[in-house]
Amino acid sequence: MENKKLQSINKQQEYNEYVQQKIPKPTYFKNCIWAFIVGGLICVFGQFLANIFKGMGLNKEDVASAVPMTLVFLGAFFTGLGVYDQLGKRAGAGSIVPITGFANSIVSPAMEFKREGYVFGVAAKMFVLAGPVLVYGYGSSIIVGLLYYFLGR
Amino acid sequence: MDYVRAFIVGGAICVIGQLLMDGTKLTPAHVLVLFVTSGVVLTALGIYEPIVDFGGAGATVPLPGFGYALAKGAIKATKANGILGAFTGGVTATAGGVAAAIFFGYLMSVLFTPKSKK
């Protein structure tokens, strides 16, 4: 009796989830609002950090390093707690595009593949998403440097 | 006031990313790569610097800001050290963030286990 009840509740839940999936989502506008607000707030927090570091007497270049480092730490930490991915479901690009999303893209797959070991699991999977970003980022910055060297003077 | 500007610029950059993800077949990974690269290119063309001057962290915290730091570092180091700087500049300018990402990323991945999804 108890089991049957549970089963029917489960089925009802499954059905509700199924319906939820099939409902045409009020996508573009709503997603953009979420992305704007969450992304904007993360940047406001970054600005807040920058002002604090400036107040502590760090020069401009040190601030430009300290802010991403702090945000990366927080992004990694909240990904570990499972909070960041929860936020990401709603916020979409709002949580992916800021540098905290870069940290998220490192921790998320690394945690997931931990059982494959600490070399091919954690360490290798850290760069599934971050790797391409670094390849194209560093690659293009070197090209810019070379172009500047050969054409700029 | 700088908070309002950071909010608007940062939000707008994220909206562009959202539109790219919803409107095209680009995955988040593609958007990240695209944003970093365009940050580098826009900085090299002198377009991104004014956006940073206006938006502050709103322009430096999103990934194009990572590209901005890369390109700015590469150009600055090339000015100082020539061709060697082209290679070292970008890495040097972003060393803190990337090292932190690797270090904290590894630490958190080892300390935490993924929450069951449901």
Image (cartoon, coloured by chain):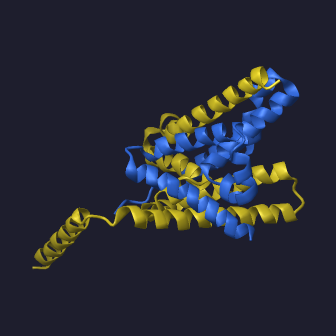
Is residue B112 visible to us here? no
Q: Is residue B103 above or below residue B89?
A: below
Using the image as rendered, state which of residue B71 and residue B95 is in the foreground. B71
**Residue lying furthest right:** A57
Q: Quadrant of the N terminus of chain B?
A: bottom right
The chain that appears yellow in the image is A
Residue B29 in the figure: left or right of residue B6: left
Residue at image coords 87%, 56% = A58
Give the answer, above or below, for where B95 lies relative to A5: above
Q: Position of residue B20 (x, y in %)?
A: 45, 49
Asked whether, in this view, residue A107 is left or right of residue B114, the answer is right
Q: Residue at x 70, y 36 (%)?
A: B44
Residue B77: image location, x then y, percent:
82, 32
User: Which x, y percent locates residue A129?
Assistant: 50, 41
Residue appearing at x 57%, y 49% in the figure: A102
Q: Toward the viewer: B93 or B97?
A: B93
Q: Residue at coordinates 53% horizontally, 40% vertically from top-left?
A: B34
> Which of the 4 image quarters holds residue A153?
top right
- Where A16 falls versus B33 (above or below)? below
Q: Quadrant of the C terminus of chain B?
A: bottom left
Q: Colour of chain B?
A: blue
Q: Is residue A18 visible?
A: yes
Q: Quadrant of residue A31?
A: bottom left
Counting the numbered discs, the total is 0
